[in-house]
Image (cartoon, rainbow, N blue to C red):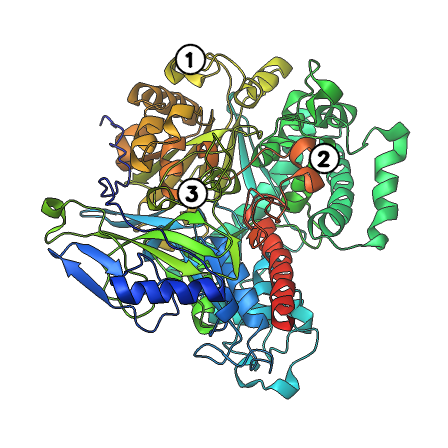
Amino acid sequence: MAILPPTMTSIGNCRSSLPCRPRCYTASSSSLLLLLLVSSATLYRSPCIGLSSSSSSSSSINGNYHRAVNAPASPRRRRRPLRVVVIGAGIGGLATAARIKSSFASSPPPALPNADEDGCAVEVVILEKNSRDRHGGRCGSFDVHVRGYGNFRHERGPSLLLLPDEYYGLFGDCGIRGSSRRNRGDDERDDDDDASSSPSSSSSSSSPVEVARAYGLEVTSCVPAYQVIFDDGDVLSLGFPKESPPSTLSIDDARLPHRDRRRRVENIERMKASEMESIRKLNSMEVNGHDKWMEYLNTCSAYLDCGLPNFIEGRMDIKSVPNFAYESLRDGGKNWPLRPHSRMLNSIFDGPKLRALASFQNLYVGLEPYENEDQWLGGITRKTAPAVFGLLSALEMHPTYRKSGVYAPIGGFRNVANSLSELCKDLNVEIRYDTRVTSVTDAGVYYLRDNDNDDDNDGNVAVGWDLSSSEEARGKRTTSVGYVDADLVICNADLPYATETILNKIDDDNNEARDDEESRHQETYDWNDKLDYSTGVIAFHWSVSRPLSSLNTHNVFMSANTTSDAVESWAVIRDDDHDMSTKLSHRVFLPMKGRPFNFYVHRPSMTDITACPPGCDSIMVLVPCPPLRREGRLASLPRSEAIDEYKCQFDADFIDDVRDAVFQRLAVLKGLENIRDSILNEVVDTPGTYADYYNVGAGVPFGLQSHGLGQLSLTRPGSECKTHENVLFVGASSRPGNGVPLVLIGSRQVAKKAVDKLKNMMAQ
């Protein structure tokens, strides 16, 4: 049957011109007293109120126009715990909130007698733009129900899980389920038990893995890690840990129903045969191909062993340096980590296919492996990967390295978000959904909130103006404005977006803050286009009526018949400076023009049978494409109008052509020749929809993805905000980088800074 792209609509917001109203002040004590006197005489009503107000009553005119009663209290007269406001319930926001709250879980110190309801000296509130079922940001799943078949689960963000200890460590540090933290008193708390504590220092009576399971997080390994399919039909599996596959069923496997046990045994035998075939295939592609492959992985593991602690986690590890230096300098420095990746590959491998196998992970960090002779240092300061990024190959596919392996969360990545949400709930972190932050000041946060929830006016939420017209609002959902005081703001919104919108309410003519209410509450979409962005993604989510057994869990389709084909397949990253005035469907790099391209396919049912109904399959296809082209004229428009225009950069013809090219490439595998006829439902995502769902700059789904030397480590945007001393950044677009494990590492670092800041506030 013919597959037509679904209509992709933006999330519209009710809006009309705002009524003229007084602005909200943060005053000194004397100014506040004067303001209160004037208010008594004039029945002054402020449009905003802090979350801590005990009198958040509201009046209604015609059932639509609402005002809050009290202005925000002066910070100098604070009669509440210190408050941290986290913008965004993405993985970074949830993890940072949990770590901060956990650090102050004991009774408040004498210096701050006021505490929140759980006796904590710090309260943490998360404001999330999306609904409850979409928390976790890009780390989440969604279901498609097909009548007569059932539910198909799809991922909208990450699909493979790396460094599981980073996930477990968070629960080991902060979790209380299945642990002794719940009954822990002041006398038992260690002096150094703060946001930077490690799993080994936790007082939990259970292991971090067991605590994570108590919150619903369970992972399984993916063996082999990848299946690579070349455009000539050559197929190779990679990533077989030394201890896998097991020779017998585990205890957990033995508890499975008979049908599932039989399937597990068949998988074990198939994996053994696949590993032997992989070795044979590597040797057939090149003389001593397997030995060369292991030489490459061993060098890359030295990069990983040194790079992870010293440059990503931010801690000194001297023990890893000697092996790193040896691998970098041996044989005349052929593996020097700051050379273009292609030079290292050329020194080890003879042909384009093994070079392609060793470098496809460069796409994850928004780079290409091939040297650009037209740029300084071969392009490594911009879009060419330095050789050090070979560490990704070791991280995923080294057979013996202790941290290597590719995993999958049972139940999809939404279970990661759900488990973190449950952790925050246990720690009394408050999460407000359908709450869209519009502006951040030195004193607090302005937001818009959809008033369709029963808990809207429970004494903790500011009530403001309905932004709908009277005719539209009667009997329908309304949107109100609000304000919340904040001593510290953790911004988990995408950094390039946040710096140009919610943190940039500046008058361009006189460089002064626009304090008028319309500016504070206007929701816009823009981003910093001075930074380097990588590719966007066209994502096809297919619900299929039959199992696609020729696919593995993770599949990479590569063009590498010749060296020129291999180089050309990365053009979508390299050729981002072409004339942007032409339609996307006519750009020369596109696969439908007959040029080589690479793409990724995810089949979750291979490792998790809950992903789809029996006898069916759920498939995600990710095809790299250009990011959104910024248009300055859209920056001042209401967000919904700007998003609609950006979505038009990827028209139906463009999507049809990409889909056809994917079908043609899939047909090299047995059983996928006519996959088009088996698709029951299709959902399509583009950079425009990612911008709509998650406010990511340029619509790039993995944040500020390009990790060239100009945006790597110390040159990548840090956690400190340059314009607001009370704001810290966390997430994929700031240090240490993108990917869930790095975001979790970053959350640990940011939480430690936040805790230090809060302790300094308490001491003042």
Q: Counting other residues with Cα less than 10 Å from the Cα at mark 2, is it few (<14), some (14-19), or many (20 or more)?
A: many
293 or 585, nearer to the observer: 585
Nearer to the camera, 408 or 717: 717
For numbered disc 3, what is the local secondary structure?
loop
Nearer to the camera, 746 or 469: 469
Q: Amino acid at mark 3?
A: Arg
Residue 532: quadrant of the picture: top right
Q: Position of residue 420 (x, y in %)?
A: 47, 62
Marks 2 and 3 in Cβ contact (< 8 Å): no
Of the 4 image quadrants, the one containing the N terminus is top left
Query: On residue 293, which mark appears?
Result: 2
Q: Position of residue 474 (x, y in %)?
A: 10, 52
Q: Which residue is mark 1?
A: 581
Q: Residues within 10 Å of mark 3 (few under 14, many from 20)?
A: many
Q: Which residue is mark 3?
A: 603
Helix, strand or loop for disc 2: helix
* 26, above or below 340, in the image: below
Q: Tell me residue 538's x, y (percent).
A: 41, 30
Whether residue 163 appears in this view of the structure is: no
The circle on residue 446 is none
The x, y position of residue 640, in whole percent, is 30, 36
